[in-house]
Image: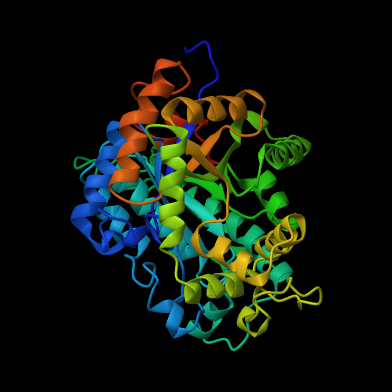
Amino acid sequence: MPDKKQLHLTAFMRPVSLHTGAWRYPGAYPDANFNLKHLISFIQSLEAAKFDAFFMADHLAVLNMPLEALKRSHTVTSFEPFTLLSALSQVTTHIGLAATASTTYDEPYHIARRFASLDHLSGGRAAWNIVTTGNPESSKNFGRDEHVEHGERYKRAREFYDVVTGLWDSFADDAFPRDPESGVYVDPEKIHVLNHKGDELSVKGPLNIARPVQGWPVIVQAGQSEPGRQLAAETAETVFCGPRDIEAAKALYQDIKGRAEAVGRNPNHLKILPAALVIIGDSVEDAQEKRLKLDSLVHYDSAISSLSIALGTDASKYDPDAPLPKDIPETNASKTSREGVINLAAKEGLTVRQLASRLGGYSGLAFVGTPETVADEFEQWLNEEAADGFTITFPFLPEGLENVTKRLIPELQRRGVFRKDYEGTTLREHLGLPRPKNRFFT
């Protein structure tokens, strides 16, 4: 085993870049989100670099922005995650396949079947990113005029997790003798009917798919609000989060792992993986110039719409050259996003225009520098318990991805903080996570 602590790295790949200007960058593939050939090359490069997982966010509606902004967005179309990951599972052998699926606008039986199928198709590489869906516009695609209230969404999510994991345990691991001599295909003594009846959900079961290869696909959680942190502490095995700096990250790390320990979980079985934009250059100045070039490609129409989405209200009505108003109403959109934007504006004294420009590109955590300087920062975050690794988002593709896989990863490997090869074949093995016991069968 390595002497040093090891980083875990996942790649944020839907959209292929969170930066609004990514598709316009010189040499970038404008259609990267919706081109299977490109996506296959991306995931195979990530697997060659020994990344833990390929991570796909998801939206259940076109982003709620004005058409003048929407026409400039590279996120309008993307493949449905399960369809794409099922295809990618057949051109890869080791890298994990993580998909977002909503507990608000889907049903537990659907989610359990899809992830169990993906886990079997991939030989044990699936992961479920539990989300409650923050975009209010999604409700209108599922027969609702109003978005489900924030607290109610998390209440349903907690019960939803119990039902899905219960369905995954419908069969014992050895439930299928498939014996032609006796004529017995499945042992009825090794089938469990869930018969769940709760406050939010009623599901009979059993699932009509054998227990997943990993027992359960790896559980990912992405909320940072109070109910989000508690849900992560009780259920998650990796946490996708967005702290702004190392001090905020340390506080979040200690809080979530402390909560996990308080409910009887091993905190080492919960990996904190903040999202981070990584831009690699020949020098720090070169990397910074790339960032400035990238930011310059964001149109103001997109910028102000990004601010509107983050706040959950139309920001175009505000004076662009004045500070953000103090009386912005609360909405059912993401509370973490809204509070982060308001705090950023206050901390840096930004006008609405300046704040919008920051958000319109990428306003989150970023590491901009040489392979050596970025590796220094990664090691600092790992050693000071600010993170167990990162969910890397790329500035533009393919160049930005290649700079990470071919320049940063070898530097991390040289330092002994990232694997040179996979030690197992399942995502749980990559992450050092135990295979869950079946709650119904010993």
Q: Position of residue 294 (x, y in %)?
A: 41, 55
Rendering quarter of residue 149: bottom right
Rendering quarter of residue 52: top left
User: Is residue 428 depicted above or below 60 in this figure?
Assistant: above
Q: Residue at x 40, y 22 (%)?
A: 411
Judge left or right: residue 226 versus residue 311: right
Q: Residue at x 59, y 53 (%)?
A: 222
User: Is residue 430 depicted above or below 209 in this figure?
Assistant: above
Judge left or right: residue 279 versus residue 318: left
Q: Position of residue 172 (x, y in %)?
A: 45, 42
Q: Residue at x 48, y 13 (%)?
A: 2
Colouring rule applied to residues? rainbow
Asked if residue 105 shows in the view, the reply is: yes
Q: Residue furthest right?
A: 327
Q: Position of residue 11 (x, y in %)?
A: 41, 44
User: Is residue 79 depicted above or below 262 in this figure?
Assistant: below
Q: Position of residue 275 (x, y in %)?
A: 53, 46
Asked if residue 212 shows in the view, the reply is: no
Q: Residue at x 52, y 87 (%)?
A: 143
Count the labels in the image.
Answer: 0
Please tell me which residue lies in front, 315 or 182.
315
Please tell me which residue lies in front, 186 or 384.
384
